[in-house]
Image (cartoon, rainbow, N blue to C red):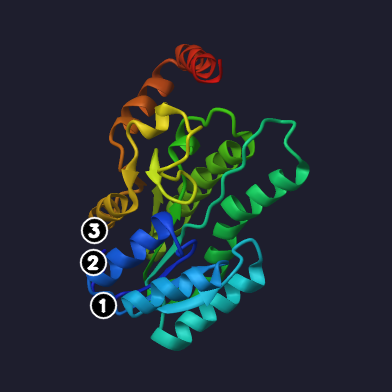
């Protein structure tokens, strides 16, 4: 997909990866960029700077997604690319509060379901459209010390795979963005306690957006701004027991 002249919606767009995507899409000549976030002030700032449309939305609420799609369509016309990008960090293990598990599920899984429900009928009727879901390297591998986040990001990847298989013959393209460390609202540059495992290879949101645009043009399913993640993914598949042993050692190393 070429970004030029396309109508694009990005959620979680007031900062981080989402903001980087909005700025890059605008620079690529998109017809319209809809900047959506629960942070109304942040979304308005980004939209004003790129000449886009700001729409406040809580992606964990289906009615908000419906209103977002309606506002985007009314302002710019049919949506060509919906980037379901919003995310939050949820630390802890199985002892994490139920509220965190439910909220992580709503933000990292159901938001993608709501987006698909809202845009797929029109896309299928027109014979084409594109869905970009932001997963995580943790959704392909695992995330130490963040069970609600990790488990739900695995579900993000699974949902994207299912949609890619199910809707391909109806002209729908699906990509799943699975970055490792990105300097963003979830992984701030000045955080002292973030494991060096992430920080030593972290990229900027702008670098991530540059990679995404190139990968969308190639219509790749897995978008991996950190190429080493593919090698780790292969190693995990080739010898799962060995992989688990490695991750146990990594956990001990970064939690001691």
* Residue 198 is at least partly visible in this image: yes
On the image, numbered disc 1 is attached to which residue?
A: 5
Name which of mark 1 and mark 3 comes first in the sequence: 1
Q: Position of residue 242 (x, y in %)?
A: 45, 11
Element class at badge 3 = helix
Relative placement, left or right, of 82 versus 224 is: right
Q: Callout 2: few (<14), some (14-19), or many (20+) C-alpha neighbours within 10 Å?
A: some
Q: Which mark is residue 20?
A: none
Callout 3 touching callout 2 (CB < 8 Å): yes
Name which of mark 3 and mark 2 comes first in the sequence: 2
- Tell me the CA gap for discs 1 and 3: 14 Å
The quadrant of the picture occupied by the N terminus is: bottom left
**Snapshot quadrant of residue 79:** bottom left
Callout 2 touching callout 1 (CB < 8 Å): yes
Element class at badge 1 = loop
Relative placement, left or right, of 49 versus 55 is: left
Count of marks, rendered view: 3
**Snapshot quadrant of residue 34:** bottom left
Q: Position of residue 137 (x, y in %)?
A: 43, 37
Q: Residue at x 62, y 34 (%)?
A: 147
Element class at badge 2 = loop
Q: Position of residue 116 (x, y in %)?
A: 53, 64
On the image, numbered disc 3 is attached to which residue?
A: 217
Q: Residue at x 39, y 39 (%)?
A: 181
Q: Which mark is residue 2?
A: 2
Decide which of 95, 156 is in the foreground and name it: 95
Above or below, comparing residue 136 to residue 26 in the picture: above
Relative placement, left or right, of 99 versus 143 is: right
């Amino acid at each position: 997909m070429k970004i030029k002249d396309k109508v694009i919606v990005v959620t979680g767009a007031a900062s981080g990866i989402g903001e980087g995507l909005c700025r890059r899409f605008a620079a690529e000549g998109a017809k319209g960029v809809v900047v959506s976030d629960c942070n109304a002030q942040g979304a308005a700032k980004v939209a004003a700077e790129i000449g886009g449309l700001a729409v406040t939305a809580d992606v964990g609420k289906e009615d908000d997604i419906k209103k977002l799609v309606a506002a985007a369509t009314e302002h710019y016309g049919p949506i060509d690319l919906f980037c379901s990008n919003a995310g939050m960090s949820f630390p802890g293990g199985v002892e994490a509060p139920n509220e965190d598990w439910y909220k992580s599920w709503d933000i990292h899984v159901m938001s993608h379901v709501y987006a698909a429900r809202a845009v797929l009928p029109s896309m299928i009727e027109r014979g084409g459209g594109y869905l970009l879901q932001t997963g995580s390297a943790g959704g392909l591998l695992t995330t130490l010390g963040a069970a609600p986040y990790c488990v739900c990001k695995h579900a993000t990847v699974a949902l994207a795979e299912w949609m890619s298989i199910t809707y391909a013959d109806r002209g729908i393209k699906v990509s799943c963005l699975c970055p490792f460390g990105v300097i963003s609202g979830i992984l701030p540059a000045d955080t002292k306690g973030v494991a060096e495992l992430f920080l030593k290879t972290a990229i900027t949101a702008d670098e991530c957006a540059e990679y995404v645009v190139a990968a969308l043009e190639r219509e790749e399913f897995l978008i991996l701004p950190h190429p080493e993640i593919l090698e780790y993914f292969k190693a995990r598949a080739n010898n799962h027991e060995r992989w688990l042993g490695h991750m146990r050692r990594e956990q001990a190393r970064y939690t001691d």
